[in-house]
Image: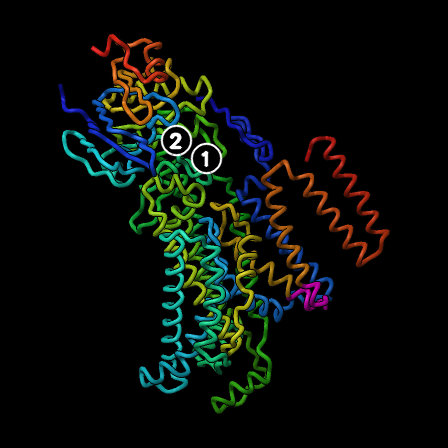
Amino acid sequence: MTDTSTEDAATRPAPPPGAPRRGFFQSLEIDVRLLGMIAAFVLIALAFNYSTGGRFLTPRNVFNLTIQTVSVAIMATGMVFVIVTRHIDLAVGALLATCSAVMAMMQTRWALELFDLSLGDPMLAWIAIAAGVVVGGVIGAFQGWLIGYLTIPAFIVTLGGLLIWRNVGWYLTNGQTIGPLNDTFQLFGGINGTLGVTWSWVVGLIAAALTLLILWNARRTKVAHGFPVKPMWAEAVVAGLIVVGILGLVAMLNAYEVPERVLERDFAARGLEVPEGYTAGYGLPYSVLLLIAVAIVMTVVAQRTRLGRYIFATGGNPDAAELSGINTRLLTVKVFAIMGVLVALAAVVASARLTNHTNDIGTLDELRVIAAAVIGGTALSGGIGTIYGAILGALIMQSLQSGMAMVGVDAPFQNIVVGAVLVNAVMIDIAYRTEAIRFLAGLVIVAEVTLILWAFYTPIWALLFLGIAGGALVLARMRRIV
Amino acid sequence: MATPLVDMRNISIAFGGVQAVDDVSLDLHAGEVVGLLGHNGAGKSTLIKCLSGAYRPDSGEIWIDGKKADIASPRDARHYNIETIYQTLALADNLDAPSNLFLGREITNAFGLVDDARMEAETRKIMSRLNPNFKKINEPVSALSGGQRQSVAIARAVYFNARILIMDEPTAALGVHESKMVADLIQELKAQGLGIFLISHDTREMMELCDRVAVMKNGQLVAAAKVEDVTEDDILSMIILGKKPDHLAA
């Protein structure tokens, strides 16, 4: 058979055999989509930092941003599996409320009677978390069973679930706010549970060392099998970027110093006084560690286990998966059970951050989670998606939201922008893969930017932009570039 | 005569009111290629899906190597070393060639994790034998040509030591050159002692590739005959009229 691939002209032309001339980014072998997302994130961060006069990239704000992202990001990793298998889960926000209600009731009432514990006992936190995870997993598995075995569309099952679980949570708590939650439980909320400077550096250095080890190991395996490897300098650039990223985040979180009055309170609780000149940084919050652990486990599942392979195969071609002997019904149950467990973990973080369970906790989270996964490159047509993309998507969403709040954008505009960003992100992603719509997508973006300039700056700038960008686009169209 | 590799006896299956396969018996020997012909909806694919485990016949038995076989799912079929290459190319487009080749039978390491490097090495090995031009090992198979995709599907059958191979229109999506390549491969597999069921609409191709042809019409088997005993016209009349030619009827 000849090598007559019908390769889409959109993708790069294949280099001639024997002469592998590769560009800078090709040598790095970084996913273009990942690069685009990181670029978008950096752009957003820099823009907000500029327009808030440097307040966006302060340690304090970065700290808040990370702990606000965790809950949605944890759920988004599970939503990747759900969407990859061509399903959807609209019930995550409601299920979060049920899990949160169960955990709150468990640690403030039920477990006290069941196990004869007193309020404040650290065991209560762990009993509550275990109960929440079981409830989340069982409800998720049940929904997956309805979808997989009874073939009720996921949209319907989870739309029903949205109404049911939101109100089961309400029923369990009589609609009351339950709190304050157990002190140990609150450690997972963010500010109330951090590693401190020293341990954060230790964790950061271990993570960096592990990254280098994994990269080195992957390269060694490739060399052992005689596969092509990327040049050493490219390997070094990628490794360097990751290490700088990890240690940079740790440095940032460590730089956020515990306020003096909080220190005073903590020392006073131990009957001590704050020593002269004593300062302490917060460092890595436990909730962020939880997110990192979830991300690692989910990535390993996605890329290195049969379960993950089957999830992606089923999303790509359900018939082929079935014919290959994969039990796609059971797979659906597993995917939704995983989603349920992750919702429970997200519920721990969300309620611990608020220090109590509220009746409306997790409201609209289903939309944030789906948006995060989709902005992160998960295709609703199934088969495509990454864990890191979903987390990055969650981070981008949260940055937009809190950035706009800091700048002082009116509340209605905040949501308008988030909605527009979601639609635009998917449009750009489709345009990247489909040549046919590229010109139209370009026109839409030019029109949007023109409108924004017209409304918020001056018509002259808008017209200038329209002339230049529109002209360039039309020229590119005539030259058949787009 | 030796025990047939596959012996399908009195297979019937109906969907709703339609008798898709009606009391069909057909056998296949090792090192033999049997072609199945007939119009669309004649029941060829349905019959063969009973063997590959995609459908369960309402009645009838399947014997393999002289023993009664119970094939309830594609997984069971694999257990009997039955491999199927589907018309629709049963590949997951979003995955690369090694993932597709080993789908459902991944090589795992000591930790139970998927060993991509070894699967890639095995894929490179078998591909260098089947299709030396195959280079895009790490790209999703959606980026491959029809012939390359078909060679992935065939490699899957060959790699796992299929003894019974079912090919449903294996050349339907291919160009002339690629069809030739598949034809050569069929001859090679036959020489290795595999039994092959081939489904196609191309009568001439079937005359070249097969040892026997079986013609179906309206769910029933019209006739099965050695290719040297029939002409192309005989086959066409069986397909269209559903009647055995006179010299076979005796």
**Chain letter, disc 2 residue:** B
Name the residue carrying label 1: B141
Name the residue carrying label 2: B152
Three-letter code for the amino acid on which mark 1 is drawn: Val
- Whether residues under marks 2 and 1 lie with C-beta atoms below 8 angstroms apart, the answer is yes
**Residue A417 place in picture, x, y as percent:** 68, 59
On-image quarter of the C terminus of chain B: top left
Residue B249, visible in the rendered structure: yes
Three-letter code for the amino acid on which mark 2 is drawn: Val
**Residue A168 place in picture, x, y as percent:** 44, 72
Mark 2 or mark 1: name the one nearer the start of the chain: 1
In this picture, is A222 found above or below A149? above
Furthest residue in direction right, as rendered: A460
Residue A75, visible in the rendered structure: no
Viewer-proximal residue among A304 and A103: A103
**Which contiguous range is marked in magenta?**
A402-414
Residue A404: say if magenta.
yes
Picture disc at residue A76: none
**Chain letter, disc 1 residue:** B
Viewer-proximal residue among A307 and B131: A307
